[in-house]
Image (cartoon, helix red, strand yellow):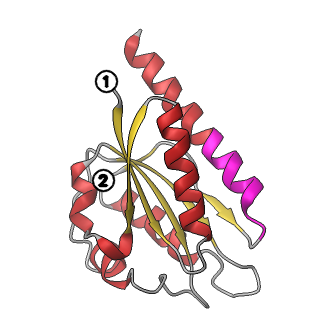
Amino acid sequence: MPKPLLILYGSVTGNAEYCAEKAAKLARQRGYDPTLENMGDTGPEVLNQFDTALIITSTFGDGEPPSGTEDFYEGVVVARRVRLTSLRYAVLALGDTVYEHFCKIGRDYDAVLESLGATRFHDRQDCDSDFEDACDAWLEGVFSALAEERAAMAA
């Protein structure tokens, strides 16, 4: 039976959405049942409905959440309305090094999820505007870590 996996994304230009769709395709190939959610279309409580989540988000301009995802960001990062002691997560942050607050939103999610009790199972990857190789490497690392956990639980 495929294991559920939440893939949450916040995108400005479509790059984070592209990475999230790539993650969902890879998840299906690796035996997971991915749920792909735009942060702009869901609320923070979705994080309580899954054991494992991939957070893929860009930073808009100089440190703002992607347009349409402000309420999700407010609920998780600012108000900290969720407790996530059973959640395991990994973050892919997209940004542009020309801005002072490079990948701020992804960094915010990474730090706050941990402070809310969630467990990081793979390191955050910060991606510049040339993001594809970094995204691919992060995805490979994510699914390798998940495969190692599955193997350890099966042993």
* Residue at 53% across, 55% down: 21
Taking the image as shown, residue 142 lies to the left or right of residue 78, namely right
In the depicted view, which residue is nearer to us: 120 or 36?
36
In the depicted view, which residue is nearer to us: 52 or 112?
52
Extreme residue in the bottom direction = 62
Asked if residue 138 is among those painted magenta in the image, a careful observer would answer yes
**Total marks in image:** 2
* Circle 1: residue type: Met
Q: Please identify the dominant SS of the magenta region.
A: helix
Q: Which residues are magenta?
A: 130-140
Quarter of the view holding residue 80: bottom left
Measured Cα–Cα span from mark 2 to mark 1? 27 Å
Tell me which numbered mark, 2 or 1, is placed earlier along the sequence: 1
* Circle 2: residue type: Gly
Q: Which residue is mark 1?
A: 1
Taking the image as shown, residue 59 lies to the left or right of residue 77, namely right
Q: Is residue 22 above or below residue 145?
A: below
Taking the image as shown, residue 119 lies to the left or right of residue 84, namely right
